[in-house]
Image (cartoon, grey):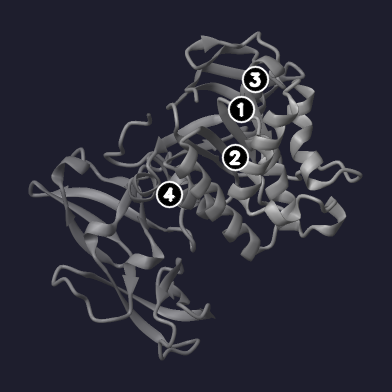
């Protein structure tokens, strides 16, 4: 096992396209860290830089405390699992798993032991004599995972290995990867654009945008205390609602005017003059049921769309200001499109953001 450290890494393509900009990141020995962000944010480039498939324009990379910035890929002792686990079609599952070991010159007994151990761990023991054409998509991806596993590397690098699978297979293999990590405690760096996958898998998540690191932390920390509007809107399904607001101070008391109402807030949030803010509230923190807290704030709106999902119903509604919101309600909520509703929100669940996107009283990015 090994730690991975990136120190002020920058990668520029064609002298003008900045794919990664001044990223500093530490992955602890035995940690499962997920790089997450939209397409083009630089997460796969970071993975390729760590693997040695790309060379950084600036900065340094350390694995296990040793500088590897100039070390070739084969000498870094890393195993990669890609989105499409390409297998040799003419080889059996056993031969596919054994191939990287034979290339490294391991003897027959070592190859047999490692292949059988990986096959047992991944549920492939009964498939060792099959060829890839006789396997399902999930089985092929497990073989690709096993081919990395048999190498017993210092760290695993996963580049969206589940994105081409259907929902059920993704859920099953996601569970297998997490279980595998719990058993092996090998350092794993996992890339995905799926925020739900990131939260389910990662011991920590690293959120990227346009090549820059936005926030690193425990999944629930990032969800509950986003450092900026981008992170707040990226995490959560449905995404966070953002409404216009204004902070001001009146007779020494801080006030927030938003959505047709007024709320007292810490006076430290206002500098004495009025300032525009964005008020963020998650759909799961809104309710059409009676308020549990006597301090709950109420919004008035009209239902525009109902989306039933079985376990819940998403209610889209429009405020008098014309701003649109969505809330998550119980599955059999008795509402119809066009109906007027009063929505309850606990003020403690609100998140405020400056117009530039930074969160008020946001935690430091680390």
Judged left or right of residue 89, residue 165 is: left
Do the residues bearing badges 2 and 4 touch, measured as CB atoms within 8 Å?
no
The one nearer the camera, 41 or 323, is: 41
The one nearer the camera, 114 or 241, is: 114
Q: Residue at x 43, y 58 (%)?
A: 240
- Label 1: state its secondary structure: helix
Q: Which residue is mark 1?
A: 46
Q: CA distance from mark 1 to mark 3?
A: 9 Å
The one nearer the camera, 52 or 207, is: 52
Judged left or right of residue 338, residue 252 is: left
Dot 2 surroundings within 10 Å: few (below 14), some, or many (20 or more)?
A: many
Q: CA distance from mark 4 to mark 1?
A: 23 Å
Q: Which residue is mark 4?
A: 232
Do the residues bearing badges 2 and 1 touch, measured as CB atoms within 8 Å?
yes
Do the residues bearing badges 1 and 3 touch, measured as CB atoms within 8 Å?
no
Q: Which residue is mark 3?
A: 11
- Viewer-nearest of labels 2 and 4? 2
Which percent across, then down, holds residue 106? 72, 23
Q: Residue at x 25, y 49 (%)?
A: 247
When the figure is inspected, residue 83 is found, relative to residue 263, above or below; the finding is: above
- Label 3: state its secondary structure: strand
- Viewer-nearest of labels 3 and 2? 2
Q: Quadrant of residue 103?
A: top right
Q: Earlier in the sequence, mark 1 or mark 3?
A: 3
């Amino acid at each position: 096992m090994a730690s991975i450290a990136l120190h002020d890494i920058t990668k520029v393509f064609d002298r003008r396209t900045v794919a990664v900009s001044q990223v500093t990141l530490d992955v602890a020995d035995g940690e499962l860290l997920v790089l997450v962000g939209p397409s083009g944010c630089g997460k796969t480039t970071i993975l390729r830089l760590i693997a040695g498939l790309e060379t950084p324009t600036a900065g340094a990379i350390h694995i296990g405390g040793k500088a590897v910035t100039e070390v070739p890929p084969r000498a870094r002792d890393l195993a990669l699992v890609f989105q499409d686990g390409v297998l040799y079609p003419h080889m059996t599952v056993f031969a596919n798993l054994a191939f990287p070991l034979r290339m490294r010159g391991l003897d027959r007994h070592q190859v047999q032991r490692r292949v059988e151990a990986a096959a047992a761990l991944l549920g492939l023991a009964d498939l060792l004599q099959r060829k890839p054409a006789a396997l399902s998509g999930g089985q092929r991806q497990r073989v690709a995972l096993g081919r990395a596993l048999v190498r017993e590397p210092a760290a695993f690098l996963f580049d969206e290995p589940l994105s081409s699978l259907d929902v059920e297979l993704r859920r099953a293999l996601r569970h297998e990867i997490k279980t595998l990590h719990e058993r092996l405690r090998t350092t794993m760096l996992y890339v995905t654009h799926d925020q739900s996958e990131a939260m389910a898998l990662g011991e920590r998540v690293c959120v990227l945008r346009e090549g820059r690191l936005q926030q690193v932390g425990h999944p629930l920390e990032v969800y509950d205390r986003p450092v900026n509007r981008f992170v707040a809107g990226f995490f959560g399904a449905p995404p966070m609602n953002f409404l216009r607001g204004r902070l001001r101070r009146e007779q020494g008391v801080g006030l927030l005017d938003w959505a047709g109402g007024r709320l007292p807030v810490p006076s430290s949030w206002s500098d004495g003059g009025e300032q525009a803010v964005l008020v963020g509230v998650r759909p799961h923190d809104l309710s059409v049921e009676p308020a549990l807290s006597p301090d709950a704030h109420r919004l008035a709106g009209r239902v525009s769309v109902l989306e039933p999902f079985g376990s819940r119903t998403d209610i889209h509604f429009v405020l008098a200001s014309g701003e649109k919101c969505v809330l998550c309600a119980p599955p059999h909520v008795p509402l119809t499109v066009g109906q007027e509703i009063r929505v309850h929100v606990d003020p403690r669940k609100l998140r405020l953001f400056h117009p530039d996107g930074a969160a008020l009283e946001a935690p430091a990015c680390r």
